[in-house]
Image: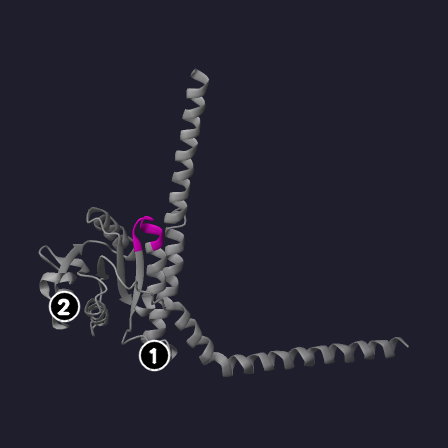
Amino acid sequence: MNRALKFKGQRGGIVTNLVALLFMAILCAVLYFARHPIMRFAAEYWVVDEPAPHADVIVVLGDDNFYADRATRAAQLFRQGVAPEVVVSGKRLRPNAGLSELMEHDLVERGVPKEKIDKLTHDASDTIEEAQVLEKVARDGRWKSLVVVTSNYHTRRVRYIYEKVFPRGITVTVASAPDGDFDPQKWWEKGKSVKLFIHELAGYIDALWELRNTRSSSVKESIATTARLYMTDEQLCINTSQT
């Protein structure tokens, strides 16, 4: 009898293993045949394209690619009347020259009048530092709204960073520039596109870590308002007790 029970247990174990293997095979097959739609969805979700219809300025972020895709998108928005001027943000390359001069040239070639272009040359080493530079310029220039133009694969990280860095009184929206090196429909087919996507994922994680102690502008405003109300109530209580 013990032998019969042992046989039944072994048979049950074999059936369980076969069912598990069959499930894994079906899952792998589904993932294999659905891999392209899944990767396409991931890239399309990653790209943010929500420019405001009107803004004070259009800001083109530095490090445009070989095809000047960011400048092309900014020129398109300018021709559509989104903003009356374009600010090109570029890293300093020489004491008297930077990427902004090259980007200005690209914009003029695409129909933006030179007098409508403002060059911003800076020493920022990454997207967060560039956002901090632009936030100060926006406050000094009394901008109330701006459309930030960057490459499609860069948009989600840019939106997160600018929401963290800019105050609530300044509205920032992001415009996606189609990039010749990153096609969301088939990015996995090119090694450079894969590297760009992985780099952006890592950059987004890094931004989450770097800005982990930075509250969003709406939270900051809420805390400040609460603090002002609390101080007002305290003052009222003091005045009442004194009278």
Mark 1 and mark 2 lie on one chain; the one further toward the N terminus is 2
Q: Residue flagged by tag 2: what amino acid is it?
A: Val
| Residue 190 image label | 1
Q: Which picture quadrant has residue 223?
A: top left
Q: Is residue 167 highlighted in magenta?
A: yes
Residue range of the region highlighted in magenta in the rendering: 163-171
In the image, taking residue 195 as reference, residue 102 lies left or right, namely left
Query: At which x and y percent is residue 118?
Result: 14, 58
Label number found at residue 112: 2
Q: Is residue 91 left or right of residue 20?
A: left
Q: Which three-letter amino acid code belongs to the residue tagged 1?
A: Lys
Q: Nearer the viewer, mark 1 or mark 2?
A: 2
Counting the numbered discs, the total is: 2
Find the residue positioned furthest to the top. Answer: 243
Instruction: Find residue 225 and report its horizontal and vertical position in percent.
Output: 39, 39
Closer-to-camera residue (234/129): 234
The residue located at (86%, 78%) in the rendering is 3
Query: Residue 85 location, x and y as percent?
Result: 17, 60
Q: Tell which of 179 and 81 is nearer to you.
A: 81
Q: Residue at point 33% right, 74% down?
A: 193
Query: Is residue 179 rendered magenta in the image?
Result: no
Name the quadrant of the N terminus: bottom right
- Contact between marks 1 and 2 (CB within 8 A): the answer is no
**In the image, what residue occupies the spot 14% across and 61% down?**
117
- Could you give the CA–CA distance between mark 1 and mark 2, rounded to whole angstroms? 33 Å
In terms of image quadrants, where is residue 153? bottom left
Say which of 92 and 231 sits in front.
231
Q: In the figure, 66 relative to 142: above or below? A: below
Which type of secondary structure does the marked residue at label 1 adopt?
Answer: loop
Mark 2 crowdedness (10 Å alpha carbons): few <14, some 14-19, many ≥20: many
Q: Secondary structure at mark 2?
A: loop
